[in-house]
Amino acid sequence: MTSGLDEVAVATLVATGAGLWIVWLLIRVRRERKVLREALHDPDPMTRLAAICLMERTGGSPFTKSLRWRVQTEEDPVVRDALAGLITHGRWNRSWSDDSLELRIWANGHRAQEPAPEVLSEVTDREASGDRS
């Protein structure tokens, strides 16, 4: 009879441990997201760039409102390029919101403004040869 009670106690401990682990994981994810949102608002462009690089690991979906605000206010061209890369190539939830749709439209427009790779290589070749025409 004690073995039945022991099995119930072990099962209860395992379930409690799993529940506590899940709660800890959720708290950790929430804290990480808060830190990334705060970093996106940092005045230093390198901090914002680092936040965007870290968001590429987790995907941009949890940050659509913050990213939308950043896209509208960002002036640093390197950070803007990183934002476009995250939005274009990052992992997103399948559900589309108005914010995520606007981000996609912005990123596609930003990417369309970049010179084509063959134009870049042609300019680089001319600069290397000293031709200024």
Image (tube, helix red, strand yellow):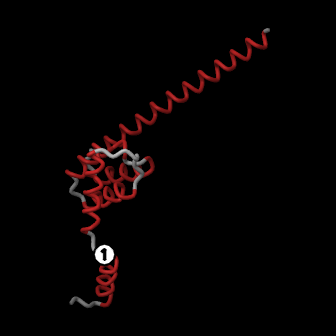
Q: Quadrant of residue 61?
A: top left
Residue 67 in the image: x percent, y percent? 29, 48
- The residue drawn where x is 36% and y is 42% is 62
Residue 85 in the image: x percent, y percent? 35, 59
View extreme (top): residue: 1
> Does residue 43 sit above or below 126 in this rendering?
above
Closer to the camera in the image, 61 or 119: 61
Picture quarter with the C terminus: bottom left
Closer to the camera in the image, 7 or 69: 7
> Does residue 8 sit above or below 37 in this rendering?
above
> Does residue 100 sit above or below 13 in this rendering?
below
> Does residue 33 sit above or below 85 in this rendering?
above
Q: Amino acid at mark 1?
A: Ala
| Number of numbered labels in the structure image | 1
Q: Which residue is mark 1?
A: 116
Closer to the camera in the image, 16 or 123: 16
Q: Is residue 107 left or right of residue 6?
A: left
Few, some or many C-alpha atoms within 10 Å of disc 1 (few <14, some 14-19, many ≥20)?
few
- The residue drawn where x is 30% and y is 55% is 104
Residue 42 in the image: x percent, y percent? 27, 45
- The residue drawn where x is 50% and y is 33% is 25
Residue 29 in the image: x percent, y percent? 44, 36
Q: Secondary structure at mark 1?
A: loop
- The residue drawn where x is 42% and y is 51% is 91
Picture quarter with the N terminus: top right
